Image (tube, rainbow, N blue to C red):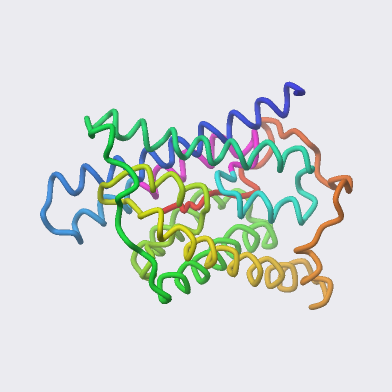
Amino acid sequence: MPKDIARQGVAEFAGTATLVATIIGSGIMGDTLSTDDGVALLGNTLATWGILFVLITIFGPVSGAHFNPVVTYAMYCRSEIELKQLLVFVPLQFGGAILGAVIAHGMFDQPADAVFEGKYRDSLHECFAEAVSTVGLLMTILGSIGADAKDQIPMAVGLYITAGYWFTSSTSFANPAVTIGRTFTNTFASINPNSVGPYFAGQAMGLAFGLPFCEWMWADKSIGSAILTLIPMVGRKAAAPQARTATDKPGLGAVDASSS
């Protein structure tokens, strides 16, 4: 594996692990310090906002700081990255998310078997909320790029996910890797494995609508051309350089942040 791809992959792995460790860890801390779920959610929200800003700022010049398979696929469809990067980033994002849950449990001395029995989040309205939050995340990232405001992506994504915690019933996961990572805890920020399917469905719907909308809105594509962006030709040459240097503007994308 070329050194540049290896470095980018490690950035995606480490960034996703740190993000999930922060989400789960701050949830445990908030739940420990307060019996009020609103106060715990506020602490969870602020920690996620802060870590997203930091991670996107430091890893953006390395890999684009996606930390999210939805963002990575969108960037591949836009010819921002190559197929080999897509195939490297996505598994490492999922692996990093799982490691992040393990790290959070280790820091807070959680039982080793405190997994896979998290909160049920399988309602139709939560699935819809994930679609909405995923569309919003793509609009935040691609809209910032389209507005020539890449420098603002770390703050914009952090602020969007902060808002998403509160205005969506799903608390705005908007990230398949983070969703899987959060099945590996039974704590405040958990999700039951049985609820992963509806969340994935919502995130996929958000991608299917959000990417074409952004391409139509900011890339001046026709509606038909924007829709076809979802189906890139396999093996096409990416338009963007494979590696990004520390002098590049940060962030072609971010998690989700989900990152929630």
The residue at 41%/64% (across/down) is: 164
Residue 143 appears left or right of 235: left
Give coordinates of residue 172: x percent, y percent: 43, 62
Relative to 229, does residue 81 appear above or below in the rendering? above
Give coordinates of residue 86: x percent, y percent: 71, 43
Instruction: In this rendered view, identify the residue nearer to me: 117 or 68.
Output: 117
The residue at 26%/56% (across/down) is: 41
**Secondary structure mostly taken by the magenta-highlighted segment of the chain:** helix
Give coordinates of residue 166: x percent, y percent: 34, 66
Does the magenta run of residues contain 54?
yes
Instruction: In this rendered view, identify the residue nearer to me: 117 or 211.
Output: 117
Q: Disc count in the image? A: 0
Work out which quarter of the rendered image holds the C terminus and state it: bottom left
Q: Quadrant of residue 217?
A: bottom right
Give coordinates of residue 139: x percent, y percent: 60, 65
Relative to 135, does residue 1 appear above or below in the rendering? above
Relative to 14, does residue 39 appear above or below in the rendering? below
Work out which quarter of the rendered image holds the N terminus and state it: top right
Residue 23 appears left or right of 54: left
Q: Quadrant of residue 90?
A: top right
Residue 256 appears left or right of 211: left
**Residues drawn in magenta:** 48-65
